[in-house]
Amino acid sequence: MGVGCLWAYFVISSVLLLWLGISGVTNDKFELSWAAGILSVILLFLPIAALLRANKKYAIWKKWAEERGWKEPSRKKRAWKKEGVR
C-alpha cells in the first residue's frame, strides 16, 4: 500500500460523510449532520498530518545523515528498476 491508497480512502470516505452531513441538514436530522461533518473533518486531517509527520521525520534523518558524511546519490545511481528486469 502506498500513499495513493491512503489518500483515496480518506478522500472518498470524507466526501461521503460530508454528503451525509449535508443531506442530514436538509432532512432536519441535525445530530447526524454534525456527527458526519466532524468525522469528515477528522478523516481529512489524518492523512495530511501523517504526510507532514513523514516529511518532518525524513528532513530530520537527512540532516542527521549529512552531518555524518552521507551524500544523496545522483539520479543515475539511485535504486530504480532497470529496463527488462522484473
Image (tube, grey):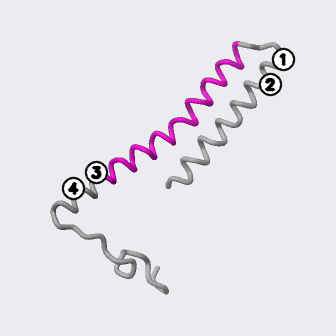
Tell me the magenta residue range.
31-59
Question: Which kind of residue does numbered mark 1 sit on?
Answer: Asn
What whole-number distance in Å separates the C-alpha atoms at marks 3 and 2?
Answer: 44 Å
Say whether marks 4 and 1 touch (CB < 8 Å).
Answer: no
Q: Which mark is residue 27?
A: 1
2 and 1 marks in contact (CB < 8 Å): yes
Residue at point 71%, 30% (across, down): 18
Q: Nearer the viewer, mark 2 or mark 4?
A: 4
Left or right of 16, for residue 47: left
Q: Which numbered disc, 3 or 1, marks the residue that appears first in the sequence?
A: 1
How far is disc 2 from disc 4 in space, using C-alphas? 50 Å
Amino acid found under the numbered disc labelled 2: Ser
Mark 2 to mark 1 CA distance (whole Å): 6 Å
Q: Which mark is residue 60?
A: 3
Is residue 2 magenta-colored?
A: no
Q: Is residue 32 above or below residue 67?
A: above
